[in-house]
Image (cartoon, grey):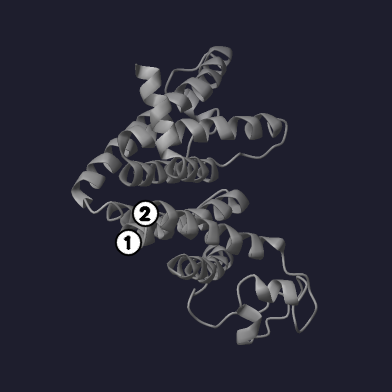
Amino acid sequence: MLLAWALTLGAIIGSFLNVLIHRLPLGQNIAWPSSYCPHCHTPLKLWHNIPILSWLLLRGRCGYCGAPIGVRYIAVEIASITIFGSSYWLLGASLDALLFGVVFALLLALSLIDWRYKAVPDSLNLTILAFALFANGHPLIALWYGLLFAGGFAMLRFVLSYYLYGKLRFLARDRLRTSWLAHYDILPSHEAMGEADIIVAATIGALLGVELGVIAIFLAALLSLPVALYRRHEDVQTPFVPFLALGAFVTFVMHEPLLRMLEAWYA
């Protein structure tokens, strides 16, 4: 019975995530007006907003203008149900399970925004971090781990940016015989990772602790590598936030076997 409630909550929050994903990047109010069709802007009825079921009954189309409703909407709701179901399954009916579910659900929204716009709203990113600080019942310890991961990621960002793009600058300097200071005007600045990645790393540290947090980031790097290689010829950046979120969730769900593997590695 409690599992059914957890899944229902996941579906409701999944519907809200679709509002966040659509409205936050556009600077719109997430609470008002009520849900509307993005094509004809007609306000939706209550039965149009039933998670998953409405999309299936309407066959993926608006009930007014017939415009297609993207499969993303139902996919987000199913993903949110999976998140809250997993949180309940692993942590039981507890406040921790609720907070873990909220953090991962919001990370899902953040990931989809980052994938589309290559940027994320700081308001949402910092809100996720705030929830993560209280998810384990030890906010001060979570804050310590979060700052540790944020500092580590900030240093990693600097080092990677230096080695990946610093050589281009020095080659330009040598070619044009300019000083080390002048070459900063020759090439544009590039960063290997964004500031949003640092905040998400802090969230992972606060949520999972040191050992599981390191595993999550390692998994994120592995998951992102094939995608980055596949897109290397395209003139687009591959955002890292979606892979950090996915790596964190996989680590959360599989934390026991992953820890056993880590212990076997150290043994």
Read off the residue under disc 1.
94
Residue found 59% across the figure and 79% down from its top: 35
Q: Which of the 4 image quarters holds residue 82? A: bottom right
- On the image, the x and y values in percent for residue 258 come to 43, 32
Q: Nearer the viewer, residue 107 or 121?
A: 107
- On the image, the x and y values in percent for residue 44 come to 64, 84
Q: How many labels does the image show?
A: 2
Read off the residue under disc 2.
91
Q: Nearer the viewer, residue 191 or 201?
A: 201
Residue found 46% across the figure and 66% down from its top: 6
Instruction: Give the structural element (helix, strand or loop) at label 1.
Output: loop
Residue found 49% across the figure and 17% down from its top: 178
Check disc 1 and give the amino acid type.
Ser
- On the image, the x and y values in percent for residue 38 come to 68, 74
Residue 52 can be seen, yes or no: yes
Instruction: Give the structural element (helix, strand or loop) at label 2.
Output: helix
Quarter holding the C terminus is top left
Q: In this view, does 173 lie to the left or right of 37?
A: left
1 and 2 marks in contact (CB < 8 Å): yes
Q: Which mark is residue 196?
A: none
Check disc 2 and give the amino acid type.
Leu
Q: Which of 54 and 255 is in front in this view?
A: 255
